[in-house]
Amino acid sequence: MNTQSSTMPESVETQAAAAVDSVSTRPFCWSLRRELWENRSIYLAPLGVAGVALIGFVPTLVHLPSKVRALSTLDPMQQHDLTERPFDMAAGLLMATFLIVAAFYCLDALYGERRDRSILFWKSLPVSDVTAVLAKAAVPLLVLPLLTFVVTVVTQAIMLLFSGVVLLGSGQSVTPLWNQLSFFRMSLNLLYHLLTVHVLWEAPLYAWLMLASAWARRAPFLWGVLPPFAIGVVEKMLFNTSHFAQMLLDRLTGAGMDALTAPDTMPMNPMTHLTPLRFFGAPGLWLGLLLAAGFLAGAVVLRRYRGPV
Amino acid sequence: MPCVEARGLRKTFGTTIALDAVDLRVDEGRIVGLIGPNGAGKTTALNAILGLTPYQGELRVLGRDPWQERGRLMRDVSFIADVAVLPRWMRVSQALDYVAGVHPRFDRAKAEAFLAKTDIRRASKVRELSKGMVTQLHLALVMAIDAKLLVLDEPTLGLDILYRKQFYDSLLNDYFDRSRTILVTTHQVEELQHVLTDLMFIDRGRIVFQCNMDDFETRYSEVSVLPNQLSAARALSPIFERQVLGRSILLFDHVDRKQLAALGEVRTPGIADLFVAIVGKRAGPAKGAA
């Protein structure tokens, strides 16, 4: 391309240059890919935990035939608990993994590249700070929840398959189990829960950690944790109230937001009623998202100014 | 259009003045060496040119404001900031994939061809490569980018002489053509003497000297003066005098070489000698001696 264009007249050369520019480079996609290359824990951790959950399911499998035989003698709520608990536990484990990986990822996202000076390499390429920060934000807000969903569903499907094999092997029908477990509904609830609570509702938390990561010259963890802690302590001392701490706790746990009403703490429970209208009508959600956007904008500005540490 | 043009470029960190009203112009097709002592403002100047730091004053790089338009500018500018800034976790193949993915003017085949001449394997991680190999990899990536301006900040720091030589040879033979511009800072000035087309000295935030290498060779002469000619030589007002192995070496600016030939052996000075004469004098005898 280069050798050709140097012999061309000016106008053709500009056209050629324009053509070169429009060669489909996808800075966002490649920035996201590079995050996955660098942080392999994003997918290795959920896969590892899924493996552990499956191994942990083996004792349950052993006792499964006797339990299912006893099912008919229990009341519906107990029946439900008995069949569904292992599936909920697996989902819960994977979700906790998601949150831990996301927190550590966010804290390192904009700090690590400055610490190892590789930011000078990233900045030598035509990728804007906005693209870079958005690609990083997409990891906790898009990649991790979807990956967690897929891994959870596959894990639960394997558990279900094993259960079926064990039951058939012991000469029982799989129908009682199938009837109790509404797999599709369970998966749908999981996806809804992940996207509402762990993405939209908790978005400001991830964005805050990324801001701390962009700000810190050392110890991003302390920058991420101490300021909120300090605000809580100051509030307690001045007004003897703990609104901020309570608010933070609500954000962390997803309590106090109205995505669903569940009979117990496990949102995958099929008896859970999804209440998206209430969720999306809550001002707290939108305030949180606004805050998240502000934090990310701050991270973009900081990435522009901050050099290697 | 000049490739880089700065007027009154200024940058302060608190009370420290890193760049003090720098006027600078780099024309297309030149290889410019920006030479200065530590802390003179070299890296700050390059960072401003690369849009890595905000500044005061006027600065245009390829007609653009680098701070406002860094993302766009980096399609036409590439740089090697220092050795070993390639991310250590990255594989060679990933580095190629990534740059090909984000850079519209990256010619992957060219980078592969350059790498084929080295011992670097595609599956290696950067952390497994030697310092010299990391630089080779970085050079392979950068040379395959059809950029108008290449900025090199101490690109050969910490490399042995073979790698350094190879680095500049590759740059000149495989990369440089008259439509490209290269701006380089280094402390290893002697190796650059025959590479550069232009020379700039920067000291305490100011450009204290600039000339092109053709002028440099006609303008400056260094004479190893015979002892009995010393007073005659000093009468021609040398700009610098130093003692080497008992002989006095005098540096002259704008003095006819024929006239000097009578005083002793005449040759073109090294960049380092001129640097010491100009910048060392400014710094005072203490720093000049060090």
Image (cartoon, rainbow, N blue to C red):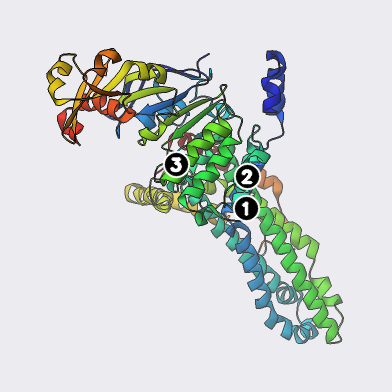
Identify the mark nearer the N-term, 1 or 3: 1
Give how far across and how far down residue B126 sits, in percent: 53, 52
Chain of the residue under the numbered disc 2 shown in the image = B
Residue at screen point 76% across, 74% down: A76
Mark 3: secondary structure: helix
Q: Which residue is mark 1?
A: B122
Q: Which residue is mark 3?
A: B164
Residue A260, located in which quarter of the rendered image? bottom right
Residue at screen point 67% across, 64% down: A263
Identify the mark nearer the N-term, 2 or 3: 2
- Quadrant in which the N terminus of chain A appears: top right
Mark 2: secondary structure: helix
Residue at screen point 20% across, 31% down: B288
Question: Please, what is the three-letter code of the amino acid marked with disc 3?
Answer: Arg
Mark 1 surroundings within 10 Å by alpha-carbon count, few (fewer than 14), some (14 through 19), many (20 or more): some
- Whether B20 is drawn above or below A291: the answer is above
Identify the mark nearer the N-term, 2 or 1: 2
Residue at screen point 47% across, 43% down: A211
- Whether B188 is drawn above or below A108: the answer is above
Q: Which residue is mark 2?
A: B96
Mark 2 surroundings within 10 Å by alpha-carbon count, few (fewer than 14), some (14 through 19), many (20 or more): many
Mark 2–mark 1 Cα distance, whole angstroms, equals 9 Å
Mark 1–mark 3 Cα distance, whole angstroms, equals 23 Å
The nearer-to-camera label among 2 and 1 is: 1
Q: Is residue A264 visible?
A: no
Give how far across and how far down residue B186 sits, in percent: 38, 34
Question: Please, what is the three-letter code of the amino acid marked with disc 1?
Answer: Arg
- B52 left or right of B248 in image: right
Chain of the residue under the numbered disc 3 shown in the image = B
Mark 1: secondary structure: loop
Residue B161, located in which quarter of the rendered image? top left
